Image (cartoon, rainbow, N blue to C red):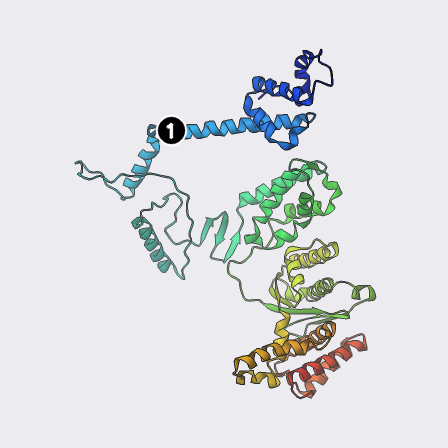
């Protein structure tokens, strides 16, 4: 490339311009100046006329004052020349240059007894093609070592018979319970993924580099840091997403990859980087095979109250919203209900796998990945912090609202839908529940469904309550008495009563 700095490019052609001093200014046009510059770079630049072609092909570079475009044009031209030269060299590569590789490959085939050397020249020779192909990884699991060994022998034989040569340095043909595969440690004895120690050390070192000079950090360095964390997702779960949310916001605000940013203005990002440097070693790994949950936690929230309980236990949480809380979004109320429940039951749920159920799909996603909304992200981080402190593995599950409606539309006269045989009548029957639901305002229906669902969850704690549609009068009375003793406002009891009545009326069963 030319050794002239961008600031001196126009100065370098001043002698040429001076030779036109006798030409009046109105006759010395931009086209003349452009022609001079084309000739100059064609002679001076390493890439010659290719620099000129690249310059002219860039519509943005039409402004002669933008000297950086000229430098960029020369860079692109030189790169293209190097690529062309490299491809020519690869095409001109002679067979003699691959002698060592072919010799080694043949020796490997001899060592593996896949070919044999003949002393007499055969009449027919099948050409031997030696090539390097992309590797294909595979893993086989079995109940015991003997079955696993048999599978390994069969796979190896099939590969060889298909014309493939297994890599003897990488393939493991004996049964093992601990191996490194796809960049992770597979601990099959304890059914866990684990991170490679060198990957953990590299992340800690990178966090240290960033935090040593937080006032001047390259965006590209932050992207590398977050990319490494996201690659750990199979091992440590969704914490990789929720605890990189702020740093990704900084990355996404960039103008270019090589710009510098002052992280002192982004305290959330610094907290995330500190978290990873301090906790990456102690984070609980994810099980390879999902185990059965130790506890099932149910939560729900309306515009008036929040509630949660642990199935098959006496642990219940009730909360009536304050005035400023009641006007929050439904996602906030659902997340707050989860936070209050986890915090209330944290000693019971400690060191356990917990499945929690909610009918708010947004709440599930935010707990797993975080949120761009600050107040929702704060709740997600609070839930995560409690789980980390008490070693709780939380698995959120979304219950579609339709599941609550199915309980209603499978009882009473709705249970006779199988008797409807004619296609036209079945179509009418299929649309009937929607019509019945739409007969009331959506807000009212949502309130009734939520109230009935809370009643249904309450009954699940007691095995003696075997039916909720229709429900016995004594069971409804006990539920209302429970609300009277725990609720802080009469509207909660009233809402529960009318919700149960609405569900029974809709199902066509006797109202208790």
Q: Quadrant of the C terminus?
A: bottom right
Q: Residue at x 77, y 79 (%)?
A: 494
Which quadrant of the figure has residue 330?
bottom right
Q: Quadrant of the N terminus?
A: top right
Instruction: Give the x, y percent position of residue 3.
Output: 61, 19
Residue picked out by circle 1: 93
In this view, 208 is above or below 3: below
178 and 482: which is toward the camera: 482
Kindly tell me whether residue 47 is visible in this rendering. no
Q: Residue at x 67, y 82 (%)?
A: 506
* Circle 1 residues within 10 Å: few <14, some 14–19, many ≥20: few
In this view, 54 is above or below 18: below
Q: Is residue 138 left or right of residue 59?
A: left
Secondary element at image label 1 = loop
Kindly tell me whether residue 459 is visible in this rendering. yes
Instruction: Give the x, y percent position of residue 353.
Output: 59, 64
451 and 443: which is toward the camera: 443
Which quadrant of the figure has residue 76?
top right
Q: Is residue 53 left or right of residue 19?
A: left
């Amino acid at each position: 490339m030319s050794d002239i700095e961008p600031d001196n490019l126009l100065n370098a052609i001043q002698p040429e311009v001076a030779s036109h001093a006798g030409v009046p200014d109105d006759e010395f046009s931009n086209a003349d100046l452009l022609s001079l510059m084309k000739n100059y770079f064609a002679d001076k630049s390493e890439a010659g006329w290719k620099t000129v072609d690249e310059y002219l092909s860039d519509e943005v570079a039409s402004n002669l004052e933008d000297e950086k475009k000229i430098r960029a044009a020369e860079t692109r031209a030189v790169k293209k020349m190097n690529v062309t030269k490299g491809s020519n060299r690869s095409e001109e590569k002679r067979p003699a240059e691959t002698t060592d590789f072919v010799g080694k490959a043949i020796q490997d085939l001899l060592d593996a007894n896949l070919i044999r050397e003949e002393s007499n020249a055969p009449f027919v020779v099948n050409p031997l093609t030696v090539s390097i192909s992309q590797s294909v990884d595979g893993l086989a699991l079995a109940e015991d070592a003997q079955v696993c060994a048999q599978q390994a022998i069969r796979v190896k034989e099939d590969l060889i018979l298909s014309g493939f040569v297994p890599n003897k340095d990488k393939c493991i043909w004996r049964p093992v319970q601990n191996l490194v595969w796809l960049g992770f440690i597979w601990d099959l004895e304890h059914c866990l993924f684990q991170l490679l120690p060198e990957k953990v050390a590299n992340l800690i070192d990178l966090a240290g580099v960033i935090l040593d000079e937080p006032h001047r950090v390259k965006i590209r360095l932050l992207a590398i840091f977050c990319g490494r964390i996201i690659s750990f997702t199979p091992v440590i779960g969704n914490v990789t997403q929720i605890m990189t949310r702020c740093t990704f916001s900084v990355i996404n605000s960039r103008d270019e990859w090589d710009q510098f940013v002052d992280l002192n203005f982004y305290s959330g990002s610094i907290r995330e980087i500190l978290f990873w440097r301090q906790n990456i070693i102690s984070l609980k790994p994810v099980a390879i095979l999902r185990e059965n949950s130790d506890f099932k936690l149910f939560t729900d929230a309306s515009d008036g109250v929040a509630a949660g309980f642990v199935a098959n236990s006496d642990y219940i949480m009730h909360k009536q919203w304050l005035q400023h809380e009641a006007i929050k979004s439904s996602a906030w109320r659902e997340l707050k209900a989860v936070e209050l429940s986890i915090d209330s039951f944290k000693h019971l749920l400690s060191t356990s796998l917990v499945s929690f159920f909610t009918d708010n799909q947004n709440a599930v996603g935010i707990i797993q990945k975080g949120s761009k909304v600050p107040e929702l992200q704060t709740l997600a981080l609070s839930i995560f912090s409690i789980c980390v402190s008490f070693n709780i593995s939380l698995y959120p599950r979304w219950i579609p609202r339709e599941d609550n409606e199915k309980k209603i539309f499978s009882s009473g006269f709705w249970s006779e839908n199988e008797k409807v045989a004619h296609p036209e009548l079945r179509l009418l029957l299929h649309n009937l529940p929607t019509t019945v639901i739409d007969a009331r305002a959506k807000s009212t229906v949502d309130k009734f469904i939520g109230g009935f669902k809370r009643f249904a969850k309450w009954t699940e704690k007691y095995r003696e309550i075997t039916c909720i549609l229709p429900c016995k009068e004594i069971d409804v009375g006990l539920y209302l008495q429970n609300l009277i003793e725990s609720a802080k406002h009469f509207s909660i009891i009233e809402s529960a009563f009318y919700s149960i009545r609405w569900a029974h009326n809709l199902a066509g069963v006797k109202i208790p």
